[in-house]
Every structure is written in C-alpha cells, then in structure tokens.
Amino acid sequence: MINQSNLIAKESTTKENRIWIRISAACNEKCLFCLDSQAQDGKLIDEDIVKKQIRDGFRPWYTNRVILSWWEATINPKFPEYIAYAKSLGYDRIQTVTNGNMFAIPKFCDKVISLWLQEVTFSLHGHTAQLHDHLTATPWSFHKALKWLIYLRKYHPHVIINIDIVVNKVNVDFLPKIVSFYMKLWIKEFDILQIIPFGRGFAQYKDQLFYNISEHIGALHDTWKLSTLPWVYMWTNRFPAEAFEWFEDLIQDPRKIKSETMGESIEMFDPFIRSQWRKKPECFGDACDVCFLKQYCHEFIASVDSISVPMINPFIIWSDDIQKIDTHNYVVLRWEEFPSEVYKKYGTTPQNFLEFIQNMELKGHQKLVNIPPCIRSKNNSVLYEDYNNLKKEYCVEDYTSNYIKNLYRKKSISCKKCKFNDTCKGIHINFIRAYGFEILHPIE
Ligand code: SF4
Ligand code: SF4
C-alpha cells in the first residue's frame, strides 16, 4: 500500500538546496564495504577549496543545507571552523555524516553543537558490537558511536539524529532487528543504503558482502514494514525498485541518479557517454550485475548499438497538457516530475490512473507510445522511446536527464509470466512510485 503522504512529504526535501562537501580524504575506520577507499590519501582537503565550495553552494531564496562529510569529516581539525563558517553564510541546516568516533569525546561534541551543528547522521551497520565492529574492521567502534549517540540524546536533545546503514550479505538478515534496536533509542529517521560494487568492498570482499536481493527479500520487506509506523521516516538508496513491491513509496527519487553520475564521478561517466561507450567505466564488467546503475549504463549501450532502430516519424511529444489529443500518428506518454503532479493529473488511486489511460480518446490510427499493453491494449504500439529518439548531444548531462525523465522504466517481478515480456519495457518509475507495481498485470 503506497504511503502517499510519505511520498509527498519527501518532495519538499528534494526541493531543498543540499550541498555535500568532502573535507577529509582520510578515515579512522576501515569499513569492508568502503566504496572509495582507493581515493583516500590520508590528507585533508585544502581549506580554500572547502570554503569556496561552502560559499558557492549557498543559493539565496532557497532552503540551504550543507552536509560536511567524507570520508570522516570530524577528523579534520577545521571541522568546527567550517560549521561556524557555514552558519555565518546563512545556511539553514548544518549536518554531518560520521562514524561517531570523535563524538565520543564530550568536549568535542559540546563544541560542535554550540557552533550550530544541527543534524548528525551516524553510520551504524549493526545492532551489536560483534556485527558493527566486524563490518567497520575497527574494534570498539560500536561502543564509541553508541556512547556519543546516548550523550547527544541526553545533553543535546534538540539535535536531529539519524542512522545510515549499509546493507550487505553480513547484516541483511539482521536489518529489521538493527532498525528496531535504534528505534528503541528514539531514532526516527533511517537511511538504508544498498552496498555498491566500487572500492575495496568489491575488490577484496565480493563473496563475503554481495548478496542476491531475492534470497533476502523477507528481511528487506520486514524492514520496509517498519517505515509504516507513523513516527518513522525511512529513506532508501541504491536499491533496485524491484526490492519494494508493496512498499513503492520507498523507491528512491529518480533524480538522485544525477548526484551519482554527475557529481564526483562525472569524470568516469562523461567519457563513457561522449565516446558512445567506447571508453567504458573502469568498473564495467562483473560488477555491473550487482550495481544499481546497471540499467542506466546498459540502456545507454543498447541505445547506441541500436542506431538502426526504425524511428517513429514524426514523434509527437505530448506531456504538458494531457487533454490535448494529437492529430498525428503517435501519442507519447512521459513522466511527471513529482508524485503530487502525477496525482493531480491522473488521480490519486491506481484505479483512477488505469481508467484515465483506458478512457483516453485516441483517433483510430493513433498509437500510444511508452505505455505497456497491460495498461491499455487498444491503440497500443508496444513502442518505447529510446535515447536515439531523444538525444541532443552525447554528454552525461543530456543522457542522465533524458534517462531520468523518459528512459527509467520498470517492470514487476510478475512480468516474467507475461507474453509481452520480451518486447515490453514497462512503465516510467514515477508511475510505479505513485501507484505501485499493482498497475501492471501479466497477460498470459
Ligand atoms: S553498471 Fe555502470 S557504474 Fe555500475 S559497475 Fe557497471 S559500468 Fe560501473
Ligand atoms: S505485465 Fe509487464 S511485461 Fe506484461 S505488458 Fe505489463 S508491464 Fe509489460
């Protein structure tokens, strides 16, 4: 059952201006799953660079949030100074993501809170020292983080505390217990991150850490169920949408892909797109099978390789005003940016949406594009736009934005039973987020 209010509440946070700033290329833990351990050279990021990023990141008239982060921000001696600097510029929210080691020192903790650190995200990957310390490869890390968390709760109750958990083969079956454990400490907000195949996690611990989601779906669903408690706020990151059947409001906002491909990693993805995949990312290969970007990368490769796909001519772009019926051959249904816009245009229930599509008045010869036949068989072309229909130029900005808006489609697990499975590409992710996988019905 989609939690619509949850979904719409999350929209407001995606409208906020969020700036992530790396201030240390070093860490005092050695997490097995670290995704960019190879980039850590033990140095601190230059003060001028950090301050420039804080300055440049501020946008007047927006709600501004700065997140001092990576690898372990708190080991930078200038961490308190950067908090004060961000406050002086007018940031509305100053946050850090930390393993909690430094905060176990009460003086440090009191100082950064007094300087206006308002939100702290703890990276805690277990509910016992045995589990957490094993994953961080750092003895006593669990006790230190817990000590600081309890200290904060007691002496600085106004500070917002949340927990992020990297899910992997070692802790996935304990995930409901881990979340429940921190709930008992009055943690209300959780960021659940799927492990990704970069850095030492894949290079050194592939077999120990990577898991098949379908084999552990019970533990994941038990965790997602906890998100339905009215006081719990749960985010998920880098999981495939298929992990959320019945909990689709937890599917990550598709626009987050921008920060993955156009942030720090732009130098890896831009040559890949510009060279029309002749320059593959270094990670290309076995890692793709357990990578949340598989569809993004491989859809692009398939698009480039299908240059000869017959173009629908002319494509009629039809997204701004659904009441307009084109007089040409094709009607192309595209995304809506926010779930609230989907609800406004198509109605709030899956039935509203299905009726809307069924009742669209198309002329006899007009064909629908981008809609699976199980939603409307009449006038369906079973045709989908691909990047060849959309591209302006081969660059990461253009591909990413087109991917998010038009190419990021999903099918349900039950689609395997459908006779259209080989040709159908499903439906845009935002319709799944708004109405759930239940709008798709296999045709036998
Ligand atoms: S899917 Fe893309 S980002 Fe992921 S491992 Fe493969 S090439 Fe790298
Ligand atoms: S059930 Fe799945 S494969 Fe079949 S038409 Fe619908 S989306 Fe396509």
Image (tube, grey):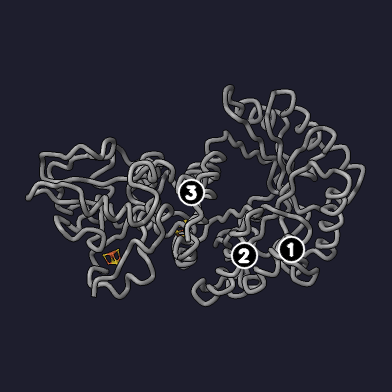
Task: Name the foreground residue: 201 vs 361.
Answer: 361
In what element is the residue under mark 3? loop
Q: Residues within 10 Å of mark 1 (few under 14, many from 20)?
A: many
Tag 3: residue type?
Asp
Q: Position of 203 compared to 411: left or right?
A: right
Give the mark toward the camera: 2 or 1: 2
Task: Name the foreground residue: 399 vs 245.
Answer: 245
Tag 2: residue type?
Val
Tag 1: residue type?
Thr
**Residue 105: percent from left, percent from top:** 90, 48
Q: Position of 351 compared to 246: left or right?
A: left
Task: Name the foreground residue: 156 vs 117.
Answer: 156
Residue position for label 2: 167
**Residue 192: percent from left, percent from top:** 61, 58
Q: CA distance from mark 3 to mark 1?
A: 28 Å
Residue that appears at 22% across and 54% down? 358
Residue position for label 1: 136
Q: CA distance from mark 2 to mark 1?
A: 13 Å
Label total for image: 3
In what element is the residue under mark 2? strand
Q: Which mark is residue 253?
A: 3
- Residue most extreme to the right: 107
**Residue 200: percent from left, percent from top:** 63, 62
In what element is the residue under mark 1? helix
First of labels 3, 1 by sequence position: 1
| Residue 204 lies in quadrant | bottom right
Q: Are marks 3 and 1 in contact (CB under 8 Å)?
A: no
Residue 85's place in the image compared with 237, above or below, is above
